[in-house]
Amino acid sequence: SLSIGIVGLPNVGKSTLFNALTKNDVLAANYPFATIEPNIGVVGVPDPRLAKLAEIFSSARVLPATVDFVDIAGIVRGASEGEGLGNKFLANIRESDAICQVIRAFKDENVVHVDGKVSPKDDIETINTELILADLQSVEKAIPRLTKEARLQKEKAAVLAAAEAAQQFLAAGDTLFSHGITKGTEQAALLHELHLLTTKPFLYVFNVDEDELTDEAFKDEQRALIAPAEAIFLNAKLESDLAELDDDEALELLQSVGQEEPGLATLARVGFNTLGLQTYLTAGPKESRAWTIKRGATAPEAAGVIHTDFQKGFIKAEVISYDDLVATGSVAEARAKGKARMEGKDYVMQDGDVVEFRFNV
Ligand code: GDP
């Protein structure tokens, strides 16, 4: 499955955040035989629609979609030169599908800042510089080889051209993502063999003081630093406390700081979207469940997420949109009112589709 690597300078609250994430680990709760990896937190993507479906279908349990967060230690200034845990850091981050940067905004004087002052702008620049330098090295190392290969293999000329274009952007201090070079584009496909970092989508967690959680002017300032990437504002210590509380107590604590949901819930949702993912829903007496697909997946591809045989033997999908199902109150009523659609193999799944697949075995 796709994963998001959590990175940040030392002492910004990464471990605190990651511990809070693993307290919410849904694997442990729902899949007792799953292997739990110490540096991976599997977090449920909150979806209130599942509880409603569970009501309609008297489901025994609810299974949300999940997103994997990987704790990647070791970014410091000079990581791209192999400083600190530089090489291990780079290897780990290459395996992630998106990069979540944790940025310190909280001002606690008891917590030392590596550069002596709290400055989100400088920290973002430090991290981006390391990622850009690492990519620049990869590209500059590859160009002589690609130049030779391009003389012998015509198709390598396009890879060389892409690498040279990338070199220019990186040398100017830009991420490749900011130039639209990211997964799903032709340029990124050409560069795939170079395992670059800055083609990955970024998202930002600002670890803020509690009073900053509701400070819209402050938050707008931070958003401006990283636009068009998404920003999440949370207080890592508070998240850690929330993870210890039962629902009522947690709600009370959230309300006391002006929040509607835990920052981790927002993070899971934004992370899921950043990975280019989407869900569809199934419901029955056993469970109501959100299944993960790539945005734009077709009905047979969606069926394949449940079982490869469902994809191979795909005949049709009976689809009722969540809103129609809730409005009619049952599958039988939805069918009677003409709200159940039979979709074929070219159907592109839509958010909120509640599905039952018909297939040959
Ligand atoms: P890491 O090095 O990025 O993993 O940072 P840690 O999670 O170990 O946090 C470093 C220090 O900052 C610890 O003493 C934490 O208790 C403290 N800390 C983390 N988050 C917050 C926060 O939101 N507010 C304050 N005041 N301190 C925090």
Image (cartoon, rainbow, N blue to C red):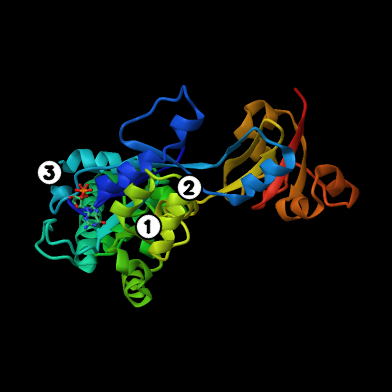
Q: Is residue 19 above or below residue 205?
A: above
Give the Cα separation between the discs numbered 3 and 1.
Answer: 24 Å
Circle 2 packing at 10 Å, graded few (<14), some (14-19), many (20+), is few
Give the Cα separation between the discs numbered 2 and 1.
Answer: 27 Å
Q: Secondary structure at mark 1?
A: strand
Disc 3 under 8 Å from ligand 1? The reply is: no
Residue 18, x across and y down, in percent: 31, 44
Circle 3 packing at 10 Å, graded few (<14), some (14-19), many (20+), is some
As shown in the figure, which amino acid type bears the numbered disc 2?
A: Asp
Residue ID for mark 3? 84
As shown in the figure, which amino acid type bears the numbered disc 1?
A: Leu
Q: Is residue 326 left or right of residue 293?
A: right
Along the polypeptide, which appears first: circle 3 or circle 1? 3
Q: Is the C-beta separation of discs 3 and 2 under 8 Å?
A: no
Residue at left offset 35%, top offset 56%:
161
Q: Quadrant of residue 92?
A: top left
Residue ID for mark 1? 203
Along the polypeptide, which appears first: circle 3 or circle 2? 3
Tag of residue 271: none
Q: Who is closer to the viewer here, 298 or 206?
A: 206
Residue at left offset 59%, top offset 51%:
48
Residue at left offset 73%, top offset 55%:
323
Give the Cα separation between the discs numbered 3 and 2.
Answer: 40 Å
Q: Is residue 268 visible?
A: no
Residue 15, x across and y down, in percent: 25, 45
Along the polypeptide, which appears first: circle 2 or circle 1? 1
Q: Is residue 205 left or right of residue 254?
A: left
Q: Who is closer to the viewer here, 183 or 3?
A: 3
